[in-house]
Amino acid sequence: MKADLIEGLAWGGGIVAVALGMTWARKLGYADGENVTRVVIAMNGLMIAWYGNRMPKRFFPSELARKVNRLGGWSITISGLVYVALWAFAPIPVAVAAGSASVLAGVAVPLVYCLSQRDKFKSAT
């Protein structure tokens, strides 16, 4: 539990450090405001992908729970990477809409899978 807190604080500190660095680069004329926004928001997508990558590494005694956890890890990791790619290359209005949709889809996939498999879950317990 303590390691999770430290990792979360490290991510938060890293995002703040990148934001401050990009703001400084903007003041020096190396980046414009749009680039600052894109980089800082893309960091959130990297954090989503990182947490999604960590999901399957947790142990669950039930095989069905492990399946859901693996599927959730994959879908959230991929949605985080799609979010980063959209914020890196797409126009900002498209990045906002499609990026949000990709993260919502990454969360919805394991939820829909759980709902579709609930009879198996009930019989397994």
Image (cartoon, rainbow, N blue to C red):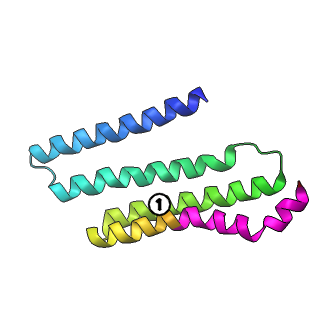
- Is residue 113 left or right of 34 when viewed as pictured? right
Residue 57 in magenta stretch: no
- Is residue 122 left or right of 38 when viewed as pictured? right
Residue 120 in the image: x percent, y percent?
Answer: 85, 65
User: Is residue 91 in view from this perspective?
Assistant: no
Q: Tell me the kind of residue under disc 1.
A: Leu
Residue 123 in the image: x percent, y percent?
Answer: 90, 61
Residue displayed at 62% across by 55% down? 73
Graded by Cα atoms within 10 Å as few (under 14), some (14 to 19) or many (20 or more), the crowding at tag 1 reads many
The one of 110 and 19 positioned closer to us in this rendering: 110
Residue displayed at 47% across by 60% down? 81
Q: How many marks?
A: 1
Residue displayed at 83% across by 45% down? 61
Residue 85 in the image: x percent, y percent?
Answer: 39, 64
Residue displayed at 43% across by 38% down? 11
Q: Which residues are magenta?
A: 105-124
- Is residue 119 left or right of 82 when viewed as pictured? right
- Is residue 16 left or right of 52 when viewed as pictured? left
Question: Compared with residue 87, is residue 40 higher up or lower down, i.e. above or below?
Answer: above
Question: Compared with residue 18, is residue 81 higher up or lower down, i.e. above or below?
Answer: below
Residue 108 in magenta stretch: yes
Residue 8 in the image: x percent, y percent?
Answer: 48, 36
The one of 15 and 121 positioned closer to us in this rendering: 121
Q: Quadrant of residue 94?
A: bottom left
What is the chief secondary structure element of the magenta stretch? helix
The kind of secondary structure element at disc 1 is: helix
Quadrant (top left, top right, bottom left, bottom right) of the N terminus: top right
User: Is residue 53 in view from this perspective?
Assistant: yes
Disc 1 marks which residue? 81
The furthest residue to the top: 2
